């Protein structure tokens, strides 16, 4: 009786070993991504302004998908700005005024229609209508307002009104939080629902901590401004540098 010849079992090459090892990981990631996309049907992702307005190419206003003849506030920037809508081409007989600034301008939104009506009455018959576009961004200082002023010039403004000054130091903290060097990676990862879900959960925890910290400062200090920025002691040199930048930014907006 002849003994059966046993065939040697071949070993997998390193390439196949790596591929087969990655299959479970890929399946897990695919399941996480699918689950996260399903969750977004009930829990929409947070609005995130990547770059927080510090990038020159960032636009505050974009065409309205429902009517390209109209411009609306970029949905990604509604976290900092009021929702605005106006015609791309200004109508004849219309005065168009852009108001730039920080939260003090942002919170004027409900008073601006009254201001527009008073201006219309005062400027008649030269202008039949007055449009006031609110460009007040929360915690925005002149570093970012320069970019908004340059953009506003594309929309045939009759005047730009700038009310700013109190956010020059607050904006330094915003610049640190923007992580501009990581922006390309943030944009890439933001296409994945699993990343958005994890990012939003972490952001929720951080926001809760910041709110708790703010409440503690409000209870412990009678000073009206309880921003974390003012917990930092700025050196005379830092103050001079920021004030010089403030002057340069104002001059730039005037010279546009």
Image (cartoon, rainbow, N blue to C red):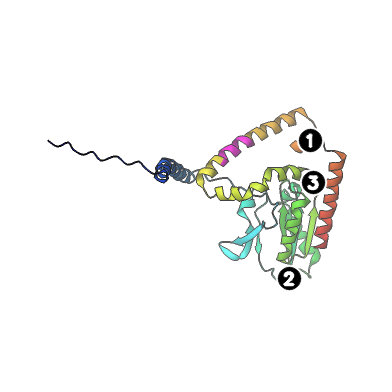
Residue depicted at 71% across the width and 55% down the height: 134
Label 2: how many Cα within 10 Å (few below 14, some 14–19, many 20+): few
Region of the chain picked out in magenta, as a range: 199-206
Would you identify the image quadrant in which residue 45 lies? top right
SS type, badge 2: loop
Q: Is residue 203 magenta?
A: yes
Label 1, on which residue? 232
Question: Which numbered dot is residue 168?
Answer: 3
Residue depicted at 58% across the width and 64% down the height: 67
Q: Is residue 23 left or right of residue 84?
A: left
Question: Which numbered dot is residue 93?
Answer: 2
User: Residue 88 or 118: which is nearer the viewer?
Assistant: 88
Residue depicted at 63% across the width and 60% down the height: 62
Residue 3 seen: yes
Residue 113 seen: no
Residue 187 position within the rendered picture, expressed as x and y whole percent measured from the top left: 59, 50
Would you identify the image quadrant in which residue 160 lies? bottom right
Residue depicted at 67% across the width and 69% down the height: 89
Q: Quadrant of the N terminus?
A: top left
The mark lying in front, picked from 3 and 2, is 3
Question: Looking at the image, is mark 3 or mark 2 earlier in the sequence?
Answer: 2
């Amino acid at each position: 009786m002849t003994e059966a010849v046993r065939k040697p079992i071949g070993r997998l090459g390193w390439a196949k070993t790596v591929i087969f090892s990655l299959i479970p990981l890929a399946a897990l990631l695919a399941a996480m991504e699918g689950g996260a996309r399903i969750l977004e049907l009930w829990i929409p992702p947070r609005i995130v302004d990547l770059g927080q307005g510090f990038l020159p190419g960032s636009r505050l206003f974009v065409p309205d998908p429902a009517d390209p003849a109209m411009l609306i506030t970029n949905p990604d920037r509604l976290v900092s700005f009021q929702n605005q809508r106006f015609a791309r081409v200004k109508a004849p007989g219309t005065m168009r005024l852009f108001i730039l600034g920080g939260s003090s301008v942002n919170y004027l939104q409900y008073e601006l229609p009254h201001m527009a009506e008073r201006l219309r009455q005062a400027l008649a018959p030269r202008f039949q209508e007055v449009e006031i576009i609110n460009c007040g961004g929360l915690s925005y200082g002149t570093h970012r307002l320069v970019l908004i002023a340059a953009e506003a010039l594309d929309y045939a403004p009759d005047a730009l009104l700038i009310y700013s000054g109190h956010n020059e130091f607050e904006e330094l903290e915003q610049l640190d939080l923007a992580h501009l060097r990581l922006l390309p990676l943030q944009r890439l990862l933001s296409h994945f629902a699993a990343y958005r879900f994890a990012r939003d959960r972490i952001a929720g925890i951080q926001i809760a901590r910041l709110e708790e910290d703010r409440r503690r400062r409000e209870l412990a200090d009678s000073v009206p401004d309880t921003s974390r920025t003012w917990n930092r002691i700025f050196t005379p040199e830092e103050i001079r540098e920021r004030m010089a930048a403030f002057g340069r930014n104002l001059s730039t907006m005037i010279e546009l």
